[in-house]
Image (cartoon, helix red, strand yellow):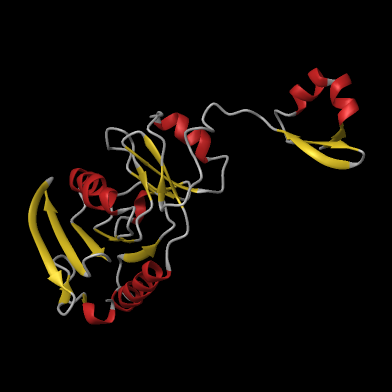
Amino acid sequence: MVVNSTDIKTNFGKYLDLVQKEDIVITRNKKPVAILTKYSKYRDIIKDGSGDYIYDNSEITYDEFIEVYKNTDGRFEYLDGVVYQLIPPSHTHQHIISCIIGEFHTYFKDKKCKPYVGPYDIYFNNSPTKDIVQPDIFVMCDHENIRSDRYFGIPDLIVEVTSPSTRNNDLVKKLNLYLQSGIKEYVIFDTKNKNVVQWNFNNKQVQKCNTIDKTDVYRSNIFDGLEISLSMIF
């Protein structure tokens, strides 16, 4: 809605009601000079910035996050009650994902389990804080857990490709979430060290952890024959 500044002064109460439904552009001499917009008590929790993850130390509840999330087109993750905003990744990050997903699509072509690439939300409703994450790549075998076009299941395999500012979450927060949630295999493609860290979990316990050099081959421990030569990645 567009209104002039005189009308705003005269009917300010009216526009305070109308702004609950849409932003109001205020003009002076027929030129836009300001915008009146609805206030959200969460607007200071989710912030723009320059890193892959930007967050405020304030914690919000799952229901509060969902209220924010459903009204935005941005990419966010919700971990341990903290909101993280994701911005477009680097060329290197996307190149690695492209190489991996190409191999995954070939392997899973005629199989029940299927690979998916982010952005794709996984709703971990059984975690203490009902975390919501967007892994770079994951393999879904429990398609029955898609409800209302959203995925509430537990992937068998998750792949994360690190960026400088996502390493802590990938190596600590997400590692713990995936361990506790029942993920069978978690694979971290570490762009800093140019290697792969492969975790396998069973009954919420670490079953195996393997670091694979860039000259070697990643081989899945849960999908026979799924392998990727790391020389094509790094």
The residue under the point 42% across, 52% down is 51
- Residue sitting farthest toward the right: 29
Viewport quadrant of the N terminus: top right
Answer yes or no: is residue 168 visible: yes
- Residue sitting farthest toward the left: 207
Answer yes or no: is residue 229 visible: no
> 142 above or below 113?
above
> 87 above or below 65?
below
> 185 above or below 92?
above
Determine whether, in the image, residue 204 is placed left or right of residue 21: left
Q: How many marks on residues? A: 0
Q: Nearer the viewer, residue 140 or 78?
A: 78
- Image coordinates for residue 44, horizontal then vertical, percent: 51, 32
Residue 193 occupies which quadrant of the picture?
bottom left
Q: Nearer the viewer, residue 48 or 142?
A: 48
Determine whether, in the image, residue 80 is placed left or right of residue 1: left
Q: Nearer the viewer, residue 201 or 216?
A: 216
The residue under the point 37% across, 67% down is 93
Viewport quadrant of the C terminus: bottom left
Residue 229 occupies which quadrant of the picture?
bottom left
- Image coordinates for residue 128, horizontal then vertical, percent: 27, 33
- Image coordinates for residue 11, horizontal then vertical, percent: 86, 20
Residue 176 occupies which quadrant of the picture?
top left
Determine whether, in the image, residue 95 is placed left or right of residue 225: right
The residue under the point 44% across, 57% down is 119
